[in-house]
Image (tube, grey):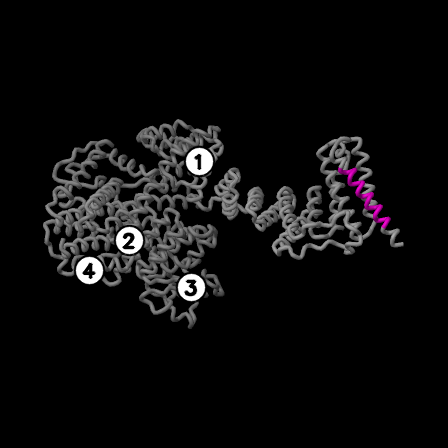
């Protein structure tokens, strides 16, 4: 194909993309913006393409769908229409066959194929724009009824065709968000673009079908599909990832956009197109909860437009009653057209949406009234390009999803919202989205909640109005996360409920067919039976609606309703499967619950609560590996799920995988820091992997939460043993009872000077913990640990006192009846007597030896009666003999000296 023909095709692509990037120019028609060589009609289909493009650019999307171009593509033969799902499936299948035949079979050469492909793409985009206008941007003209995306000779009421479209959209694994109009147009656009993409893929060897923007349009249509669903769809996400990667590869860099369209581009259009695709990728990642990729795409958009912004401070007033100015957050930007930093705020307080609505100036300003001084005079408010305004609003999304949900989060968003409010010119969708962000912010504040409700009412009204026209609402509608009209009205209804206006909310929810919200409202009014009657009335008219059956099951708690939902949905109702899985779990039928959750997650895997529930059911069913896999999927989708991280850690503990368990516990404790059980498990795992510092942190946290009541003696014993082993490595031999008195005249045993500094630090930490415990808890185990620690530190006197307290804690009548208790008492007694002998050797004192002899004699006397054959008795007798020998040696030494 000649270069001229290729440029003509790319010119058509550019005209279509311009509809979503910038407002149509009122000075000159769009075709006059191209060089003359790209406007000539060299092919019979050029006139059809140009007429379609003109209709699309004018916002007459129904006119484009009913034009001669549609007749040329779909043929003149009359379609047989019957009001049934099967008829809809057959007709749309025939349409796809006609499209394939039109593009491939009926074309005479490569040039003809290219024109035909562009015609099909224009038809698909017309259908997508009409759906977008009816369900996202407005205006919602109720007088125009066009359920079919193609022209038929006679108008029929095809209710089942809309049901077919619902089934097609819900096959992605989720119910619809609410009641949408003209669903067939979205399905039609998706079918045509996917078919065209397949045809282009089959003929990639020729330059004819190098229409790169098809991938971008597919992303937009699939993203609108996702936004009409109640939940995120895994199948849509996979497709979006593929096509968005293709689109970014084609248009994600300035040089690629410039080389593709070259001289056809207007001033600054290269950066606008590149920034727009990165913004749309940012919205995609935001919808699926992928914050880091979302942030990267926003940074790429800012780099393409050379925009930098940051939050600074300025003095100003927030209310009319405020006397002294206070510090306010303002946005500072550096744009490609500005000379240095500029402040995106107004010194006035009369900017913002309320001025457009015609309301009175409120007591709380919409934007702060700033006090400008000479240093800020150079930072006067600047005018931002529309795509730059969209980037600032996208930053609000990152703040909303990437920070903690508290009162400060909304205030962090305030300077960005106020920056857009201060702009004199803003696209319709940007204005609406900015107003919505302000409503969400002000509805959380008591002083402005009433204003937020009024603004929300005006916002819904503005979208429904006919002015501005559809073509002026489309630009950048895919680059901002503006909710669909049903989602916006649902949010309005929820705001009404929060303000106590339940009756008005019921009207909205009923019109949107949001049965769950409706049930909740009736329950708030104490009219649960009215909700049941309403759903039954709807079921009498639409018995094949699975959502109604699920809602009835929720309110009546009847599994048969969910089973009926599965029946009418051909076993595709994810909600019904989830409800039956929960019911089986509550009954204790964990195996069935596990199977049902597996079936539900197979239909839509982007549901973190479902993976968590599957893990819980598998755990109860003793399927450890399945439970571990499910909890892992849960944290992949929701990294903030502390319970799932804890379960993963515990399962790794069961499987003796300490390293993996340690990592999982660290993640869990970021979100569940007040659970002493979790800290206790973490302390053991930390010890398993040799991280004593983390074990100490966990022990101190447990003691703090339990006020020194929860003491893990087993763990402390493990740490003590580890430190004893470390200490013995540099101190191979300790003082022996047989050591000659003359060989050591020191008064205490000093710790080994060669011990590593880390070991000494750990000993100090352990000592602080034990001393903290013994102030409130004086159990035998703790006194034993305190004695061992004192012995390592070389303080034998403290060691003997601790061992004496341990011995006394075991004493009592029970010790001579309980053999296990006697064993512990005997071991403590032996340790005490050995320490007494060491003290005697080091100090030359006989008092400790007399104490040891007296204690052993009394103990042996009682043990001879209660446990005459025990090994402990023999050890006590042996120790008594050693004490007496030490006493004799001490006397001999004394006599020799005298």
Check if mark 2's residue and mark 4's residue have beta carbons within 8 Å: no
Question: Label 2 crowding class (10 Å Cα cut-off): few <14, some 14-19, many 20+?
Answer: few
Query: Residue 353, relative to residue 783: is it above or below?
Result: below
Identified at 73% across, 32% down, the residue is 818
Tell me if I can see residue 60 in this picture: yes
Task: Identify the residue under disc 3.
Answer: 369
Check if mark 2's residue and mark 3's residue have beta carbons within 8 Å: no
Q: Is residue 631 magenta?
A: no
Q: Earlier in the sequence, mark 1 or mark 2?
A: 2
Task: Identify the residue under disc 1.
Answer: 614
Query: Residue 380, relative to residue 667: is it above or below?
Result: below
Check if mark 1's residue and mark 4's residue have beta carbons within 8 Å: no
Outermost residue on the bottom side: it is: 374
Identified at 43% across, 67% down, the residue is 371
Q: Quadrant of residue 383?
A: bottom left
- Nearest to the observer: residue 739 or residue 82: 739
- Nearest to the observer: residue 59 or residue 620: 620
The spot of residue 301 in percent (x, y) is: 33, 57
Real-space Cα separation, disc 1 to disc 3, in angstroms: 54 Å
For the residue labelled by badge 1, is the local secondary structure a helix, a strand or a loop? helix
């Amino acid at each position: 194909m000649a270069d001229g023909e290729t440029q003509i095709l790319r010119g058509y692509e550019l005209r279509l993309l311009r509809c979503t990037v910038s407002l149509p120019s009122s000075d000159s028609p769009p075709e006059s913006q191209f060089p003359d060589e790209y406007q000539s009609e060299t092919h019979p289909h050029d006139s059809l393409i140009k007429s379609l493009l003109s209709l699309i650019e004018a916002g007459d999307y129904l006119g484009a769908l009913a034009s001669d171009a549609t007749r040329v593509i779909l043929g003149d033969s009359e379609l047989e229409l019957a009001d049934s799902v099967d008829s809809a499936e057959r007709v749309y299948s025939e349409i796809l066959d006609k499209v394939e035949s039109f593009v491939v079979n009926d074309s005479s050469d490569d040039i003809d194929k290219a024109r035909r492909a562009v015609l099909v793409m224009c038809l698909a985009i017309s259908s997508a724009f009409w759906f977008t206008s009816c369900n996202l941007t407005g205006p919602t003209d109720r007088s125009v009824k066009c359920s079919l995306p193609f022209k038929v000779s006679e108008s029929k009421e095809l209710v089942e065709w809309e049901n077919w479209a619902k089934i097609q959209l819900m096959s992605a694994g989720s119910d619809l968000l609410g009641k949408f109009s003209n669903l067939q147009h979205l399905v039609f656009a998706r079918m045509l673009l996917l078919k065209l993409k397949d045809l282009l893929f089959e003929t990639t060897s020729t330059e004819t079908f190098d229409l790169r923007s098809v991938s971008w349009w597919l992303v937009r249509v699939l993203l609108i599909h996702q936004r009409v669903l109640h939940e995120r769809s895994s199948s849509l996400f996979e497709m979006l990832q593929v096509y968005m990667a293709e689109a970014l590869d084609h248009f994600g860099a300035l040089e690629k956009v410039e080389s593709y369209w070259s001289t056809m581009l207007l001033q600054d259009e290269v950066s606008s197109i590149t920034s727009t695709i990165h913004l749309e990728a940012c919205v995609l990642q935001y919808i699926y909860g992928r914050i880091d990729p979302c942030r990267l795409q926003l940074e790429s958009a800012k780099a393409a437009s050379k925009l930098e912004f940051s939050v600074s401070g300025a003095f100003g007033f927030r209310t009319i009653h405020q006397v002294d100015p206070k510090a306010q957050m303002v946005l500072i930007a550096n744009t490609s057209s500005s000379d240095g930093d500029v402040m995106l705020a107004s010194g006035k307080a009369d900017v913002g949406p309320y001025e457009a609505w015609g309301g009175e100036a409120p007591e709380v300003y919409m934007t702060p009234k700033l006090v400008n001084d000479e240093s800020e005079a150079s930072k006067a408010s600047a005018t931002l390009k529309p795509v730059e305004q969209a980037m600032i609003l996208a930053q609000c999304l990152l703040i909303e999803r990437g920070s903690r949900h508290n009162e400060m989060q909304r205030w962090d968003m305030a300077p960005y919202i106020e920056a857009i409010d201060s702009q004199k010119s803003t696209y319709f969708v940007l204005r609406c989205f900015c107003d919505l962000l302000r409503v969400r912010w002000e509805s959380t504040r008591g002083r402005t909640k009433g204003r937020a409700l009024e603004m929300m009412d005006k916002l819904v009204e503005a979208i429904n109005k006919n002015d501005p026209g559809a073509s002026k609402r489309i630009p950048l509608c895919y680059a901002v996360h503006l909710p669909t009209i049903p989602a916006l009205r649902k949010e309005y209804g929820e705001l009404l409920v929060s303000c106590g206006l339940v009756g008005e909310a019921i009207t909205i929810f009923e019109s949107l067919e949001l049965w769950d919200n409706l049930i909740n409202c009736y329950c708030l009014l104490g009219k649960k039976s009215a909700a049941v009657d309403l759903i039954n009335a709807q079921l009498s008219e639409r018995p094949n609606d699975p959502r109604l059956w699920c809602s009835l099951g929720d309110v009546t708690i009847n599994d048969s309703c969910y089973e009926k939902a599965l029946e009418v949905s051909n076993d595709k109702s994810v909600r019904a499967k989830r409800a039956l899985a929960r019911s089986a779990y509550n009954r204790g039928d964990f195996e069935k619950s596990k199977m049902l959750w597996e079936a539900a997650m197979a239909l839509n895997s982007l549901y973190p609560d479902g993976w968590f529930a599957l893990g819980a059911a598998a755990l109860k069913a003793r399927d450890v590996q399945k439970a571990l896999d499910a909890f892992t999927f849960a944290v992949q989708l929701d990294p903030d799920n502390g319970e799932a991280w804890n379960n993963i850690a515990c399962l790794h503990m069961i499987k003796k995988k300490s390293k993996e368990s340690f990592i999982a516990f660290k993640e869990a404790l970021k979100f569940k820091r007040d659970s002493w059980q979790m800290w206790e498990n973490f302390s053991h795992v930390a010890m398993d992997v040799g991280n004593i510092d983390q074990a100490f942190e966990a022990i101190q946290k447990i003691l703090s939460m339990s006020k020194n009541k929860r003491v893990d003696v087993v763990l402390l014993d493990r740490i003590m043993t580890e430190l004893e082993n470390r200490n013995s490595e540099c101190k191979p031999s300790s003082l022996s009872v047989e050591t000659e008195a003359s060989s050591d005249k020191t008064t205490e045993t000093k710790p080994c000077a060669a011990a590593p500094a880390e070991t000494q630090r750990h000993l100090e930490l352990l000592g602080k913990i034990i001393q903290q415990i013994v102030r409130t808890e004086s159990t035998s185990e703790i006194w034993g640990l305190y004695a061992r620690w004192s012995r390592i530190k070389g303080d034998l006197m403290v060691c003997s006192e601790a061992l004496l307290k341990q011995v006394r804690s075991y004493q009592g009548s029970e010790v001579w009846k309980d053999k296990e208790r006697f064993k512990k008492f005997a071991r403590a007694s032996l340790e005490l007597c050995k320490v007494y002998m060491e003290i005697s050797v080091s100090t030359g004192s006989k008092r400790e030896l007399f104490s040891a002899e007296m204690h052993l004699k009394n103990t042996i006397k009682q043990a001879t009666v209660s446990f005459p054959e025990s090994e402990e008795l023999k050890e006590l007798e042996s120790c008594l003999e050693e004490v007496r020998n030490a006493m004799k040696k001490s006397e001999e030494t004394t006599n020799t000296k005298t």
